[in-house]
Image (spheres, rainbow, N blue to C red):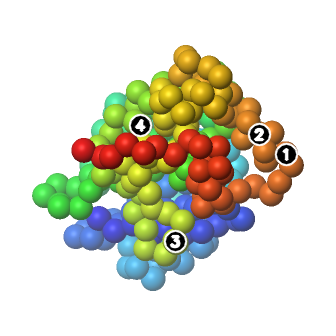
Amino acid sequence: MKVKVIPVLEDNYMYLIIEEHTREGVAVDVAVAKRLLEIAGREGVSLTTVLCTHHHWDHTRGNAELAHLRPGLAVMGADERICALTRRLEHGEELQFGAIHVRCLLTPGHTSGHMSYFLWEDECPDPPALFSGDALSVAGCGWHLEDSAQQMYQSLAKTLGTLPPQTKRDDDDVPTVPSTLGEELLYNPFLRVTEDPVRAFTGQVAPAQVLGVLCRERARFQLTSEPPQPQVRALLALQWGLLSTRQEK
């Protein structure tokens, strides 16, 4: 399995997943159709499927054009609001593309129909990969726009947080991606809402309430500054005293 990380717009990525034996291509979150097709052509890939994490325009704006240029293309996701959707996915559903397996994980919070995708390959020593859209990012998480902090906590801690710690977002091109879940559990405060330093910072104990305070503090910080890059978010966590000192087992 090969993953091409494609920077688009100002601060987004779309991804091209390549099954290296069959040369089948699966895209995640298509924002710019022609850019994706250019890279697929350069890689000698037959693009068959688009996996959408959620319906927001910066993750789906290329779907309609791509479907027009590639008749028969499958566009999949969990939300009927996704542009050009051809198949609605359910939580726990599994897909297969050659040797690549995909487990669909519903992770509501940022949107009510947000889906993350956990990928692994048969007989491959490489760690699995997670495409988490705006549910989980490097040193941060998405805004809980359509659901409660409790629902966001369930998605982060109970769904994504239980995946193998070596799970990563693969990278060929971009220095700020990937991260592993093991790394995120060390420095991402939004995944560490049950730890004493994070609770002390927020003045709360219940995990969902801790998460809610963190999200409000982030919003307040971002109202008075430029949107922070992943490295800046990590430094902000350090400044807040939220970095973990525990050792991975």
Residue closer to the observer: 138 or 151 = 138
Q: How many marks?
A: 4
Q: Earlier in the sequence, mark 4 or mark 1?
A: 4
Taking the spot 56% from the left edge, 33% from the top edge, the residue there is 198
Residue 69 x, y percent position in the rendering: 57, 66
In the rendered image, which quarter is residue 170 located in? bottom left
Q: Residues within 10 Å of mark 4 (few under 14, many from 20)?
A: many
Q: Label for residue 223?
A: 1
Residue holding disc 2: 219
Looking at the image, is 62 positioned above or below residue 135? below
Amino acid residing under circle 3: Pro
| Mark 3 vs mark 1, CA separation in Å | 26 Å
Quadrant of the frame with the C terminus: top left
Instruction: Say if mark 2 contacts mark 1, CB within 8 Å.
Output: yes
Residue 43 x, y percent position in the rendering: 40, 79
Q: Residues within 10 Å of mark 1 (few under 14, many from 20)?
A: few
Amino acid residing under circle 1: Leu
Residue 242 x, y percent position in the rendering: 56, 42
Quadrant of the frame with the N terminus: bottom left
Instruction: Say if mark 4 contacts mark 2, CB within 8 Å.
Output: no
Instruction: Say if mark 2 contacts mark 3, CB within 8 Å.
Output: no
